[in-house]
Image (cartoon, helix red, strand yellow):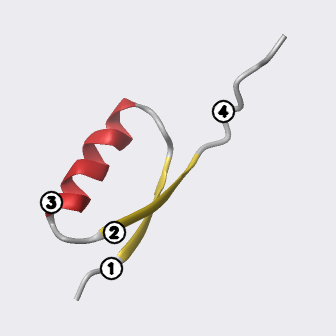
Amino acid sequence: MSSNVVIIGAGGHSKVVADIIIKSNDNVVGFLDDNVPIRD
C-alpha cells in the first residue's frame, strides 16, 4: 500500500527526498514552501 506524502520545503534537498519517496512506491502529492518569488 502506498502513502501520499507532502514535502515541507522546495529546495534542493527536497528534490532528493522526493526521489527517495517515489522510488519507495509512495506518492508525492505536493511541496509546501513559504519562499514566494518576488516579481517586479
Q: Are marks 2 and 1 in contact (CB under 8 Å)?
A: yes
Q: Which residue is mark 2?
A: 27
Left or right: 32 as drawn, with respect to 2: right
Q: Quadrant of the N terminus?
A: bottom left
Q: Which mark is residue 23?
A: 3
Q: Secondary structure at mark 1?
A: loop
Mark 1 residue type? Ser
Q: Residue at x 19, y 54 (%)?
A: 20
Cα distance in 3D space between marks 3 and 2: 9 Å
Mark 3 residue type? Lys
What is the crowding at mark 3: few (fewer than 14 residues within 10 Å), some, or many (at least 20)? few
Left or right: 40 as drawn, with respect to 17: right
Q: Nearer the viewer, mark 2 or mark 4?
A: 2
Cα distance in 3D space between marks 2 and 4: 23 Å
Q: Earlier in the sequence, mark 2 or mark 1?
A: 1
- Give above or below for 34 relative to 19: above
Give the percent coordinates (x, y) of residue 40: 84, 10
Q: Which mark is residue 3?
A: 1
Q: Which residue is mark 4?
A: 35
Q: Nearer the viewer, mark 4 or mark 1?
A: 1
What is the crowding at mark 4: few (fewer than 14 residues within 10 Å), some, or many (at least 20)? few
Mark 4 residue type? Asn
What is the crowding at mark 1: few (fewer than 14 residues within 10 Å), some, or many (at least 20)? few
Q: Residue at x 39, y 75 (%)?
A: 4
Name, please, the residue furthest toward the right: 40
